[in-house]
Image: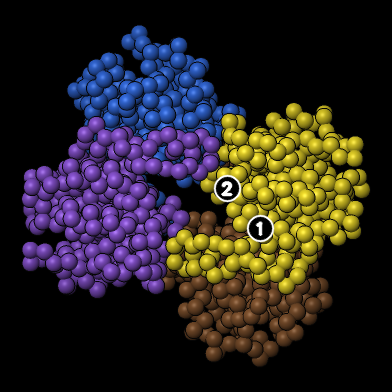
Chain colours: A purple, B blue, C yellow, D brown
Amino acid sequence: MRFLLIGDIIGRTGRNALKHFLPSVIEEYKIDFIVANAENSAGGFGITEKVYNQLIQLNIDVLTSGNHIFDKKDAFKLLEEKENLLRPANYPPEVVGKGYNIFEKNGKKIAVINLMGRVFMGIPLDCPFRKFDEIYEEIKDKVDYIIVDFHGEATSEKNAFGYYVDGKADIVFGTHSHVATADEKMLPNGTIYITDIGMTGAYHSVIGMKIKEPIEKFLTGINQKYEVSKDGFLFQALFVDLEKKEFKRIKKEQY
Amino acid sequence: MRFLLIGDIIGRTGRNALKHFLPSVIEEYKIDFIVANAENSAGGFGITEKVYNQLIQLNIDVLTSGNHIFDKKDAFKLLEEKENLLRPANYPPEVVGKGYNIFEKNGKKIAVINLMGRVFMGIPLDCPFRKFDEIYEEIKDKVDYIIVDFHGEATSEKNAFGYYVDGKADIVFGTHSHVATADEKMLPNGTIYITDIGMTGAYHSVIGMKIKEPIEKFLTGINQKYEVSKDGFLFQALFVDLEKKEFKRIKKEQY
Amino acid sequence: MRFLLIGDIIGRTGRNALKHFLPSVIEEYKIDFIVANAENSAGGFGITEKVYNQLIQLNIDVLTSGNHIFDKKDAFKLLEEKENLLRPANYPPEVVGKGYNIFEKNGKKIAVINLMGRVFMGIPLDCPFRKFDEIYEEIKDKVDYIIVDFHGEATSEKNAFGYYVDGKADIVFGTHSHVATADEKMLPNGTIYITDIGMTGAYHSVIGMKIKEPIEKFLTGINQKYEVSKDGFLFQALFVDLEKKEFKRIKKEQY
Amino acid sequence: MRFLLIGDIIGRTGRNALKHFLPSVIEEYKIDFIVANAENSAGGFGITEKVYNQLIQLNIDVLTSGNHIFDKKDAFKLLEEKENLLRPANYPPEVVGKGYNIFEKNGKKIAVINLMGRVFMGIPLDCPFRKFDEIYEEIKDKVDYIIVDFHGEATSEKNAFGYYVDGKADIVFGTHSHVATADEKMLPNGTIYITDIGMTGAYHSVIGMKIKEPIEKFLTGINQKYEVSKDGFLFQALFVDLEKKEFKRIKKEQY
Ligand SMILES: [Fe+2]
Ligand SMILES: [Fe+2]
Ligand SMILES: [Fe+2]
Ligand SMILES: [Fe+2]
Ligand SMILES: [Fe+2]
Ligand SMILES: [Fe+2]
Ligand SMILES: [Fe+2]
Ligand SMILES: [Fe+2]
């Protein structure tokens, strides 16, 4: 089974970068199953129904998310209706939507779990470590593969989570920082881990957005209206073959 | 002129990884000038005189630092005495030590500037963007090259800084996250940029430290005594040839 | 000279509480000069021209502010045009508006300085301690009285600031927490100090806002649309007579 | 039943202030039951066995705590052994100690619950709102009175909690800020609420500590060794008579 994991897709530029690069990557790597983080897919903040449909038509199997999932109100309806759109599982229980689900593909059962870190995230969530344990007990005998999108800021928390679930999850891929890390590796008990896959969006940008406004924000302390950068394409992903225990970080650029 | 930029060196394991890999890297890449971040070089927190001397003997030209520089009290004396040990320049003016300095090597004048980000860093510093401008006005006509270690957490702030100084600094390398990013690139006006070089330390670790205690901290909320991991070697650096405008991320592992 | 210092005025309810209580307080205490914080005066976030005019008609002499001052776009124009609307002085120098000004009343010259703390405020500002020093050098020989609105979250930072300027400022009154503190006192060198004056707004509320949405935010982690509570009136202020060195916290309620 | 609620006791000065003022307050108000927060009672950080014994001998019935409870290692043993020393109940379940307990006095059963806020506290805790609900279901039919020490920074979170448990808890008293708030009130459904009782410690101090070091910390960004101030006494408490639904903030000073 050959997986492709894609990080935060940033607005229209990110969707266009997907259209541009994804088909050939799927073919080249003979991808069976794709997970992508959609928290920034609509205008850089949140998701809409239209954008959801576009992403699904690009052959993405499961959409994960993070702190920006509720930025646009379509999310509430989508999270209720769509089986393959997830929000972090450690949002409190009453919050709309699912934090994990089990998918079938090529005769295999694949659990995708979405979790969010708590350090520097500013959102009062339940413990992602214990939430993993809880879900793991629930699903471990029912699935062939377990894949986790750990959406978080602090590298220490993401590292710690990777080792904590080493041997239980098959793949842990980090998202949220929008910058790919170069630390893809196999942990001692077999989990394939990367701290952050990085975004798919504009090549020249401040984490996907036009450069001027973030600089102005840092210079003045005054909130600015951010817009998605259109300056070049950057496509990033992690390829994993879970039978052969092979993995490779993929980066495609055009600028 | 051929530069090697090294991120946070984590304790004895990091120093041993340097001893193990650095000589051959210097030879292979014909390195002229080395900058390394020493904020975690002594036991994972701060620097001591003994460790300073060890690092200098490994042919490092300049040591930069960050939020952990004052963790061990030797730092106060070292920052006063040593011309090639820097602390972030945007600490307030009265704070002991230098935030930048000019070095001569092979007939060239090289300014190394150390700055620290403010997002999620918990330290009340002056504006790193304006501090760069101020130093730049001071030095721009006196030096051949300008190299910046931007020590920070938030990828947005580091991205924004890179574009802000694009065409003024020759190299901007990020430190502090202890995880290398895979986004080394040339910005539109010629600055060579990477969000984070990543640490040099133990291969299996939570950002350089033994795994058990950070996991315990995340599970309980109770502070733990962290120790430097000894589990394998990871050496990371950025090579830059500023004449040829060539650059390459280097990663050496042994585990 | 008899001063009245008023904290964050929260929306229409806060303005109505002012209309209701302020005239009789002015009369009872024979107030000469009023400073009030207007950062939440329009709908709970920011200020508009209409609201500015209302507040001035209520005989407030100077309006200070804080982190919410730029929430509504009228602020940019008002800060440029109005001599008696301040934003924190430790915003970077290029930011529109004044951080202090000198006012004349009853033949006396009164400097009002607005500063903002940096702990937990999430805005990258210049050092408020040094900014005070800088302004103090500028004005100390030109004015009869110096009054500081220190807008901040952390009690430690506000305490430290009070003692730092003790004997230089005549009055330091804290704002931002929206809850009055009971620690009004004279510091050893004569400065009248209070950590926070507290808001003027709705009696039953979560720091001025309707109760339901903040609870929902804390329970779910999802941002809510906050509205100004209308449940009762709370008027809070500090009265100071700087000749007699007398002061008294005032609290008027109706619910 | 007449209660006295005391906030953070800061080091030896705080204990001496208790010795000085508490006996006469007990007598004057005919106090039946005393709860005090001991998180800073030993040297300003944490608690020791010796200090625990001192506080109990002063007739305090229950000691609550907060983020500093684990600062000294005695806490681990004390939390295991002592029925009347609490740590916040929303620490994860495995953490040593109790978050609430039921006490008998004068034939009445009194539940004391200790909870901690999550905003700006930097500790990954479970939801204090839901933890209250869980404990409340457990105890509501077994006790006569429910008293909550909500240890937190953000006034919004403390306000929201108060209204959330209004009518379920009899008293909610906030701690942690070390500065008393002047907002003691009865909420619509009968809960007696105060955002923060404030510390018992030195009158002139930065939240209980000597003034010089905190100022130095804010000026330089470099950690300092804090010491408990000895400059005067400040004793603060909330008196509540739950039968008569009367309450009064008490403040005693000597400087
Ligand atoms: Fe994102
Ligand atoms: Fe995110
Ligand atoms: Fe570091
Ligand atoms: Fe650092
Ligand atoms: Fe406010
Ligand atoms: Fe504010
Ligand atoms: Fe405390
Ligand atoms: Fe505390």
* Residue at the (47%, 79%) spot, across then down: D134
CA neighbours of label 2 inside 10 A, class few (<14), some (14 to 19), many (20+): some
Three-letter amino acid code of the residue under disc 1: Ile
* Coordinates of residue C223 in the picture (x, y in percent): 47, 60
Dot 1 lies on which element?
loop
Disc 2 marks a residue whose amino acid type is Lys
Q: Which mark is residue C10?
A: 1
Q: Is residue B98 above or below residue D134?
A: above
Q: Which circle's residue, 2 or 1, is located before the other in the chain? A: 1
Residue D99 percent coordinates (x, y): 51, 73
A12 over D98 or under it: above or below: above
Please state the horizontal and vertical placement of residue C19, each as a whole percent of the image.
77, 59
For the residues carrying marks 2 and 1, which lies nearer the camera in this image?
Answer: 2
Q: Is residue C30 above or below residue D139?
A: above
What separation in Å lies between label 2 and label 1 (alpha carbons)? 14 Å
Q: Chain of mark 1?
A: C
